Image (cartoon, rainbow, N blue to C red):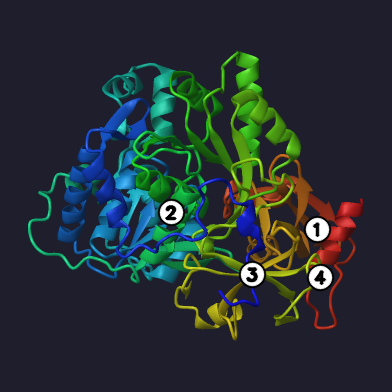
Amino acid sequence: MSASHPRPWLSRYAENVPDDVPLPAGSLSGIVDDAIAQYPENVALEFFGRTTTYSQLGEQIAAAAEGLRLLGVKKGDPVAIVLPNCPQHVVAFYAVLRLGAIVVEHNPLYTPRELRHQFEDHGATVAIAWNKVVETIQAFPNDVTVSTIVSVDLTEAMPLRTRLALRLPIRKAKEARAAITTTVRGTTPWSDVVSAKPISHDVVGPTANDVAVIQYTSGTTGYPKGAVLTHLNLGTNAAQSRAWVPTVERGTAIIYGVLPMFHAFGLTLCLTFAMSLGGRLVLFPRFDADLVLTAIAKRPPTFLAAVPPIFAKLTTEAGRRGISLKGIEIGISGAMPLPPEIVDKWEAATGGYLVEGYGLSETSPVLIANPVGPSRLPGAIGVPVPNTDIRIVDPENPVSERPQGEPGELLVRGPQVFRGYWNKPDETAEVFVDDEDGRWFRTGDIATIDEKGFVRVVDRLKELIITGGFNVSPSEVETLLRDAPGVADVAVVGLPNDHSGEDVVAAVVLEDGATLDVEAIRNHAKDSLARYKVPRRIVQVDELPKSLMGKVLRRKVRDQLSAE
């Protein structure tokens, strides 16, 4: 760090948080290998009450790695994982990495169109998929070649009593079973993959600088792009996150996996951070307040990473049902602003801390977080974590720093910052800027930093919509809606929502003679977009504000809709 860029935030760190953490020398496999060696009989995973020890997890990873090798997976190959949170997801993740192959995470609730676009981009020929989405992958056009699909039945990881209950000949059981599993053909069952004998010969594994994960993000504009994250990126971020909570003792922590592990936030705080702690990762296939509160009543988490609506829901429901939240030591909130009233209610109910953090898929993702201690500052996103430097610059001249307290674009650098976008050198070049101190990543967010180093995000240069913690590209939704019945033109923007961050809102110009049919437009969108991308509001306007070049000015659209 040069003298011209001091780190005023270091004095705000909680007790025992280091200025920097040592960079990992090896691959992510070392994270789980260390936990297996130190805590072999400790519970690593819990799923609907069924547990897996670290020793058992190690055996499953070794067997799955050999099973995938026999299917042709080798070092450097992208392997698609299309799974909700489940034990098989954890095993698959580390088995792929052990071979030196590259994990490509996908949202299993994506529509066929959304999944196809990502497969076209990364080119994986092997997919490990929830059996409920197998037919979607099998229906890809011929130019998307997925030669091997490993199908995963979530029920196989459940306790015997749960599996037997799902087979009862009653309607409720049949409906529950149909929601989580189905019969598929033309695949390799996951049970076959993990029945392989563990690797008994040399396999060239990954190094710290090899690519570990392709994490899809909308980046700054347009369709999702694959952020290339190395073992060093992700391993460092796990170490940074662990250093941020020194009161969480290794080998004893209980971490709830309510965030989807295909999302950057969930990936790091569940798949790598939790394993690096040698903790018990309690997995939930989706957020369900009933399931989570039932688990809390039996064994509350030490650490819970979630988004504000989840913290609010759990606080309200726990109070209504008389379930104590005491014992939850630390809550980390991200992906959207954290309202102070949620913090107050959560901390009163738990006796622990709830702090906000900030990150991006391109940064593994954790960059900034509030200290877990008295020095935190509610309303700010926090201070940079160890090994991380930031600058606030003029967006039009990103090598020119803004005076303290003035808003500007947030630039960051650190070992957790990604290598670039998969096969997109031009887009990669656009998000980096070099100066005499090195290379900086342009976040696209407008922020301020005070004299103590606390950062507040005040606006976004990029026009992504963040709803429920997920990124929505306006361009993607607009392209689809322009083909909707009666729509001549459209602009899609995000408007603030107290519960989910932002609502997706579409301003539409209708064709001559057409009348607004909101349901027809929404149904058109539902056929090709994940539910969270479908506009919650559709507003008719006479015209859209445009620049001299004919580009729709989304910020003006947003301002107009906000004023209504």
Disc 1 secondary structure class: strand
Q: Are marks 2 and 4 in contact (CB under 8 Å)?
A: no
Task: Give residue 501's position: percent from left, percent from top.
Answer: 70, 47
Amino acid type, label 2: Ala
Q: Distance from label 4 to label 3 (Cα)?
A: 38 Å
Q: Which residue is mark 3?
A: 6
Task: Give residue 27's position: percent from left, percent from top.
Answer: 30, 62
The mark closer to the camera, 4 or 3, is: 3
Q: Which residue is mark 1?
A: 507
Count neighbours of disc 2 (C-alpha within 10 A) and say few if under 14, some if 14 to 19, many if 20 or more.
many
Q: Which residue is mark 2?
A: 238
Pick whichever of labels 3 and 2 is earlier in the sequence: 3
- Between 91 and 432, the one lying in front of the other is 432
Pick whichever of labels 1 and 2 is earlier in the sequence: 2
- Between 478 and 421, the one lying in front of the other is 421
Task: Give residue 517's position: percent from left, percent from top.
Answer: 78, 49
Pick whichever of labels 1 and 4 is earlier in the sequence: 1
Q: Are marks 1 and 4 in contact (CB under 8 Å)?
A: no
Which numbered marker is on residue 553? 4
Image vertical order of residue 136 relative to residue 500, above or below: below
Residue displayed at 46% across by 64% down: 118
Residue located farthest toward the top when viewing the structure as drawn: 322
The mark closer to the camera, 1 or 2, is: 2
Q: Are marks 4 and 3 in contact (CB under 8 Å)?
A: no
Image vertical order of residue 321 relative to residue 359, above or below: above
Q: Are marks 1 and 2 in contact (CB under 8 Å)?
A: no
Q: Distance from label 1 to label 4 (Cα)?
A: 12 Å
